[in-house]
Image: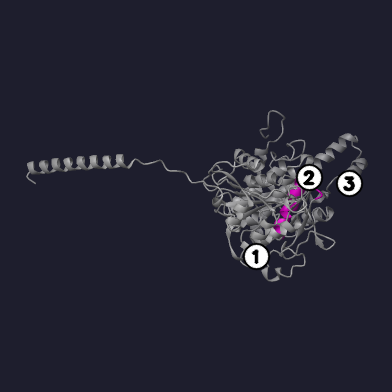
Amino acid sequence: MAETNPNNGKLTQQEVNDICWRACDTFRGVIDGGQYKDYILVMLFIKYISDVWQDHYDDYMRQYNGKVERVERAMKLERFKLPEDASFNALHKVRNADNVGELINIAIEKIETLNRPKLDGVFQNIDFNTEQLGNTKDRNRLLKNLLEDFANPRLDLRPSRIEEDVIGEAYMYLIERFGSDAGKKAGEFYTPSPVRRLVAKLAKPEPGNLICDPTCGSGSLALDTGREVAGGACRLFGQEKNGGTLALAKMNMFLHGVDDAVLEWGDTINDPKLLDEGRLMRFDRVVANPPFSLDKWGAEDAAADIYGRFGRGVPPKSKGDWAFVLHMLATAKRQTGRVVVVVPHGVLFRGAAEGRIREAVIKENLLDAVIGLPEKLFSTAAIPVALMVFDRRREAGGEQEQRKDILFVDASKEFTSGRNQNTLTDANISKIFNAVEAREAVDKFAHLAGFDEVVENGFNMNIPRYVDTFEEEEEIDLAAVQAEIDRLDEELTQTRARLRQHLKELGI
């Protein structure tokens, strides 16, 4: 029996995380983390919905005194449907079958079919019967081990046995661990938790907001932003180019109880899917961690963009950073929308087309704050990154129209170091957020630059131009240094004289 939290007798978050991570040992050495994450997360998903289904079934049996017909009617009203032969227990029973991979595929197809549109397309890129998992004998052994890992009696995921949202947190935990494990491939689906929390706080969502992440990955950034709203009274939207990653996002939303999220599959720049009568949808908050300096992002078609996103200029074809920023600005509600985006520092100062776009955006009075973050926050990139905060309340007609300054924050030293990766602590996040809220100068940390100062700098947003972090060196007393040198020279002369005398006495 698992050791449980003595305060409530429930399975703890750490216990669930540890059990799930140990289950990953089944795949290590067979395929890399960028691939086996799909199998682990799908099996965790099946185990969870099966335990929830069983928990609800047992509750109804007690409530209706074992009257099966009434129980079955009640179960039909559940937020998801689970065929009996597609449950985790049913799959565990056939773990020794020669075609166990095929049976798992059939089960997940049934689950998806019965839960459309919530789970539409979730399992389309996962195949438990593929030769990537080895020949038939090896594959059967691997899948048997996987089913037995998740059949661990300690991994009881019924709502009556776990804290609220513990499974959603375990899912995020695994995604983060896979992100660290998978290296550069992780960038497709993973933003470190501290960065997500900071972006979410800076977005400052409000009840009733429509929140969008146009490069949503596994959906965690959108979820964290939604959590900033009391009671979750908001709607989440997202688009993701990678079908497998979008499946993670849909499962992630489902496990966090977000049934009304709208997640679309496609290339946000070249084929935006979040439309309203043929026009780009508008959102109250837009947050994203787009791919850094994406090559071949679609520059050749941008000038003729039917949505008018590139009227300020077309970014260079080898660096798509501003393409994503311009899309985000185009989808933020006029005069009220707020945008927070993670970017490489080059976005702040590169010239040519990017410089012209940056100048246009600043002249429109859309940029509110620039925050430099520490290096090595991402497992996918050792370089430091920055956050750009845009506020459409500052544009003509908005309630912040009179605000013309831009806040610069150098938070490059705000971190706790790790062996391979640095992290932002809660104290670091609070310090950064409070500085943005206060909009006041803080020595060697924050500077509020007026429009004229930005113009003088040629619309270059490089943070060291605005925040002076130079540490004055202690004044050196040159006379004292020279006196010490003279003393040492004299001491050396005396030492050499004594050495020569000793050598003479020895006849050398």
**Display coloring:** one colour
Tag 1–tag 3 contact (CB < 8 Å): no
- Secondary structure of the residue carrying tag 1 is loop
Is 254 contained in the magenta span?
A: yes
- The circle on residue 107 is none
Q: Is the magenta region chiefly helix, strand or loop?
A: helix
x then y, percent, for residue 122: 76, 56
x then y, percent, for residue 107: 78, 54
Quick one: which residue is furthest to the front in this view? 452
- Secondary structure of the residue carrying tag 2 is loop
Magenta region, residue range: 243-260
Real-space CA distance between mark 1 and mark 2, rounded to the nearest whole angstrom: 39 Å
Residue 254 seen by the camera: yes
Which quadrant of the figure has residue 354?
A: bottom right
- Label located before the other in sequence (1 or 2): 2
Could you tell me the amino acid type at mark 2?
Gly
- Label located before the other in sequence (3 or 2): 3
Residue ID at (71%, 63%): 269
State the residue position of label 1: 315
Q: Nearer the viewer's eye, disc 3 or disc 2? A: 2
Q: Nearer the viewer's eye, disc 1 or disc 3? A: 1
Could you tell me the amino acid type at mark 1?
Pro
State the residue position of label 2: 257
Please indicate whether residue 503 sits to the left or right of residue 467 in the image. left
Residue ID at (81%, 48%): 259
